[in-house]
Image (cartoon, rainbow, N blue to C red):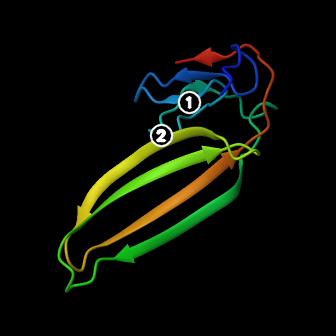
Amino acid sequence: MSNPHPGAAGATRTCPHCRETILESAGVCPACRHKLRFIEPTSTTAAAASVPLRVEGSFRNPVDRGAWEYSMVLTIRDERGQEIARKLVGVGAMQPDEQRTFTLSVEMSPAVASSKRTWH
């Protein structure tokens, strides 16, 4: 996995609110949803993100099965099938007749060239 230099497409930084690694170009943290910088409404850098992938599924623990545990793991692979990132997103347990719903979405937006930004 490459680590692009600041200002390049794919460059990352740490969210000051939740400490997750996010894209340097993000105006809102995708993890905690805090605003990170002011974006002029007429700015060309404020391109709308598209969501080319969204998957949602749910399951219910049967009443007669007892408690079950789960781990949600997210893996990202490149075009050659090599693992780029693997994250344990969450763990938990379900008692009989409990339900969980999981949603995975990928947001994409055009990379923007480095410019003056107003940071919070």
Q: What numbered label is drawn on residue 31?
A: 2
Q: Residues within 10 Å of mark 2 (few under 14, many from 20)?
A: few
- In the displayed structure, does residue 64 sit left or right of residue 88? left
How far from the left and from the top, in percent, is residue 18? 40, 30
Task: Between residue 33 and residue 66, name the one nearer to us.
Answer: 66
* Residue 64 to residue 23: above or below: below
Q: What numbered label is drawn on residue 65?
A: none
Q: Secondary structure at mark 1?
A: strand
- In the displayed structure, does residue 81 sit left or right of residue 111? left
- In the displayed structure, does residue 117 sit left or right of residue 119? right
**Mark 1 and mark 2 in contact (Cβ < 8 Å)?**
yes
How far from the left and from the top, in percent, is residue 63? 21, 85
Kind of residue at badge 2: Ala
Task: Between residue 80 and residue 107, name the one nearer to us.
Answer: 80
Q: Quadrant of the N terminus?
A: top right
| Residue assigned mark 1 | 22
The residue at the point 52 percent across, 18 percent down is 120
Q: Marks 2 and 1, Cα distance to the nearest angstrom?
A: 8 Å
